[in-house]
Amino acid sequence: MERKPYPSDVSDEGIIEPYEKSELIQDMRDQYQRIGRVVLRLFGKGTKMKTHDYQTFASEYASFGIDGTQYLAFRDVPKLIRKHVSGTHSLDYGCGAGRSTRLLKSLGLDTVGVDISNDMLQQAKLKDTNGLYRSIKSGELPFDNESFDLVFSSFVFLEMSSLAEIEKVLKEFRRVLKPNGICIFITSSEPGYKGDWVSLSFDFPENKRELRTGDTVKLLIRGTNIILYDYYWTHKDFVEVFGRSGLHMQELHQPIGLETDQIKWKDEAHSPPMSLYVLKKAASA
Ligand SMILES: C[S@@+](CC[C@H](N)C(=O)[O-])C[C@H]1O[C@@H](n2cnc3c(N)ncnc32)[C@H](O)[C@@H]1O
């Protein structure tokens, strides 16, 4: 917006339409308010921060296997699938560099991976040249109603900045699930943000506070320089969103590290870093 000349804007010809004092004060107030709104948008309350920089880290992510603490996330997935899923059509929502998609395929599931990050999808295609991977917008699936026996999603909801977004995505899962279809998703558990884990560290001064719904939590992937920020959602948050999305919780599985895993567990030995939710379509929705 073009500002009027201040009284000090004196040209050789004199002052051009100077401000009245009150007008000047009002204009300065407007300017400060505008600057304030921009600062607030960039740094303050309501800011949706970029939690994961996949443009920079996609190839490093692609090198991650299913080991360390992450091994625990996936260890019991085959058992859960055998127990709950009939049929082989599966969708991996937020497939990233395809680690989870390749796991599902290795279990005999006919799987398509979708993601909002083209950098991650590029890595997935490099590792699985015949695989099916598609770019999507969040919560918008290019599939017909009732297409899948399983919708799987690992470590994606902790990147969503609002419960409304999670609800939108879960409603879309419900739409593409067959009538007896199952959704399994993996996310950090509440104790997951407090523990000392083999592959993850949350030991930052910023995290030394009582976490509340929607807070961001800083974490380091051990053995790398990758710092991430997760959104913190409680079990209660998830259960409420399931209800609004027409999904019913069949099982909550929280894996603990075992001696037979042959990994020198830290807190994993007694506390579950992740939650695996098994959902099906609610009868009445
Ligand atoms: C931590 S990675 C996990 C990738 C893979 N599922 C795995 O376990 O290795 C999270 C992925 O979710 C994707 N993602 C984040 N928000 C998403 C959303 N709203 N819809 C779809 N994908 C999303 C990111 O682009 C990223 O590739």
Image: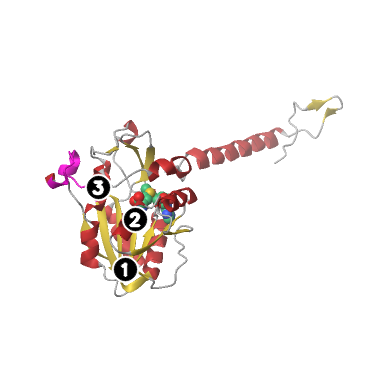
Query: Which amino acid, mark 2?
Result: Arg
Q: State the extent of the magenta-drawn residues as a range.
A: 260-274
The disc, 2 or 3, on the residue closer to the chain's N-terminal end is 3
For mark 2, what is the residue? 102
The residue lying at 39 percent from left, 71 percent from top is: 147
The residue that mark 1 highlights is 88
Give the farthest residue toward the right: 13
Q: Quadrant of residue 18?
A: top right
Assess whether mark 1 and mark 2 are in contact (beta carbons under 8 angstroms). no
- Amino acid tagged 1: Thr
Instruction: Write down the quadrant of residue 175 in the picture.
Output: bottom left
Image position, residue 279 (x, y; %): 28, 64
Residue under numbered circle 3: 71
- Label 1 Cα crowd, 10 Å radius (few <14 / some 14-19 / many 20+): some
- Residue at the image position 23 percent from the left and 48 percent from the top: 72
Does 168 sit left or right of 22 as displayed? Answer: left
Name the N-terminal-most of marks 1 and 3: 3
- Residue 95 horizontal side relative to residue 79, left or right: right
Q: Do the residues labelled 2 and 3 touch (CB within 8 Å)?
A: no
Q: Quadrant of the C terminus?
A: bottom left
**Picture layout, residue 89 above or below residue 113:** below
